Image (cartoon, grey):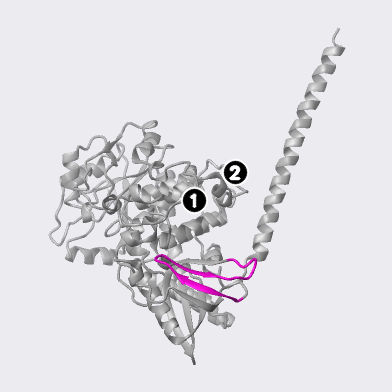
Amino acid sequence: MEFAELIKTPRVDNVMLHRPFYPAVEGTLCLTGHHLILSSRQDNTEELWLLHSNIDAIDKRFVGSLGTIIIKCKDLRIIQLDIPGMEECLNIASSIEALSTLDSITLMYPFFYRPMFEVVEDGWHAFLPEHEFELYAATTSEWRLSYVNKEFAVCPSYPPIVIVPNSIDDEALRKVATFRHGGRFPVLSYYHPKNGMVIMRSGQPLTGTNGRRCKEDEKLINATLRTGKRGYIIDTRSLNVAQQARAKGGGFEQEAHYPQWRRIHKSIERYHVLQDSLIKLVEACNDQTHSMDRWLSKLEASNWLTHIKEILTTACLVAQCIDREGASILIHGTEGTDSTLQVASLAQIILEPRSRTIRGFEALIEREWLQAGHPFQHRCAQSAYCSSKQKWESPVFLLFLDCVWQILRQFPCSFEFNEHFLIMLFEHAYASQFGTFLGNNESERCKLKLQQKTMSLWSWVNRPSELSKFTNPLFEANSLVIWPSVAPQSLQLWEGVFLRWNRSSKYLDEAYEEMVNIIEYNKELQAKVNLLRRQLAELETEDGIQESP
C-alpha cells in the first residue's frame, strides 16, 4: 500500500493552528505518510511536527465554509486546526483518520526513521539476559540460564532465555509450561543479595474445577525455598475472581499441594476498568469550569489514585516479605503480563538501589516489561480520547510509571533520573520513532526483525547530550531499601502528565533551573574548599619540616 493513496489533500495554505501555551499561528499544513506538519513563514515560530501514530481521536466542526479539526493526542495534548474550505477540511480529516489507524506494524514510522545522530551504543544489545544473569552469578550458584524457549516453542510471550532454579531441568520446565496460563512457567524476576530471597513470576496454574496438579510445578516452586522457610504466593486477583477462573480452566495453587506456601489475594484492577479510569481522569483534568467540590468528586470518581494505592500497597507487601521476613515470593494474576509485572517491578525499585539509576531502570523496563511479554502494541493502541475501545487497551504501563513518580516524589534524592525521564517513556510507549515498544512480546519483535530494521530508544536516550536532560541533580546514591508511604494523603495527582497541557509549567521550570544552578555553584564552592584544605595541609607540612631540628 502506498501512503499517497490515503492522502487526499497533501497540502493546504492559510491554516490557523491553536495549541497550548503558544500564540495562534497561520501557516501551511502538509501531510506526509507519518507526520502532520504545520510550518509558518513567521520568524521564530516553531514548526509543528506531529506523528500520526500520536493521534488518538479527531473531531470536526463547520461554520460556513470554515472547517475546524480538533486533534486529541495520545500524550493528552489537544490541538485545533482551522482550515478554509469544507472539502479540504473533510479530506484532511479523513486522511488523518486513515494514517493514524494503520493496521500493519511494518508501515509505522520506526521502520522508516533514520537517525540524524551518531549511534554510540546499540540499545538492542545493551540489556541482554546473559549480562543481567552475570550480576546474580557472582553471589549465587542456585540459578541457571535456560534456553528451553529458544524458538519461542514453550512460551510465545517469554524471551528465548530465562533464569530458573539450577535443580530443575528443561524437560521439567516443558511440563510446568503446560500447567501454567500461556505457558508462562515460574521464572526468576529478582534475587535479593542481602538474604538470597527471590521474586518469581508466572501465569496462573491451570487447576480447573477438577483440582488438577503438576508435580514438576510443585518441585520448581519449592526449589526456591531454603530449609524450614515458607514462601508467599501473591495473587493479584481477588479470591472471588480467582475462584471464577477455575470454571474457565484457570485457578490458583491448592494449599494441600503447596504446603510451604501461603497464598495472599490482593485485588488489582485490569483491562477496561483501568481504561475507563484514565478516560474519567483526563476528562476531569481538561474541564476548567469545575468548582472545588466538583473537581474533587470527579477526581475520586475516576479511581485513578485508588489503583495507584492498590499497586503500591502490593509492591510494598512483596518487598516486606523479601527484606524483613526473609521469605521468597511468587507473583501471578491471570496471564502474568500486567499487574504481575507492575508489582514485581515496583518491589525491585523499593528493594534494589540499581533500579533507581538510569541504566538500572532501563534494564528493569527491558527485563520486566519488554522481555517479560507485556503486550505494548495492544495496551497502548489508544489513549484517553478514543471512543472505539478494544478490550485489550489499558494504561497498565502508565500506571506503573505513575507509581514510580509517587516514590520519586517521596524520595527525591534516591533516584538518578528525573520526572522528565518517566514522561518521555510514557510518550514513547504510545507513539515513537523508535522500535523498542513495538509488538506484544519478544517473539513478535523477532518476526518483525526490529533489531535490524529499527532503532532502539536506548541508543538515543543513553547519549550524553540526552542523558543530561533526564538526570536528577539532587541524586545521591542510596544503598538502602526505601519504604514509600501508601497513605491516601501521601499520593498525589501526577501534574507533569495530567495537567501538563492545561497549566503552564513556566515558573516550575524556572525554579528547577535555579535549583540546578545552586547545586552547580555549591559543587564549585565545595571544590574550592577542598583545594584550599589541601593547600593548607601542604603549608602546615612544610612548616613542620622547617621547624624540626
Q: Which mark is residue 93?
A: none
On the image, which quarter does residue 59 sit in?
bottom left
Q: Is residue 320 visible?
A: no
Q: Residues within 10 Å of mark 1 (few under 14, many from 20)?
A: few
The x and y percentages for residue 522 are 72, 44
Mark 2: secondary structure: loop
- For marks 2 and 1, give the one nearer the viewer: 1
Mark 1: secondary structure: loop
Depth check: 250 or 96 in front?
96
Q: Is residue 208 visible?
A: yes
Give me the residue at 41% from left, 69% from top: 383
The x and y percentages for residue 494 are 53, 65
What's under tag 1, amino acid-wise? Answer: Met
Q: Residues within 10 Å of mark 2 (few under 14, many from 20)?
A: few
The x and y percentages for residue 338 are 34, 59
What's under tag 2, amino acid-wise? Answer: Glu
**Pointer 1: what residue?**
116
The x and y percentages for residue 68 are 49, 83
Residue range corresponding to the magenta coloring: 24-46
- Horizontal placement of 382 versus 486: left or right? left
Q: Which mark is residue 476?
A: 2
Give me the residue at 62% from left, 48% from top: 473
Give me the residue at 48% from left, 73% from top: 282
Give me the residue at 43% from left, 73% from top: 10
Q: Is residue 163 above or below residue 444?
A: above
Mark closest to the chain's N terminus, 2 or 1: 1
Instruction: Quadrant for the C terminus, please.
Output: top right
| Residue at the far left in the pictured view | 210
Report if residue 48 lies within the magenta region.
Answer: no
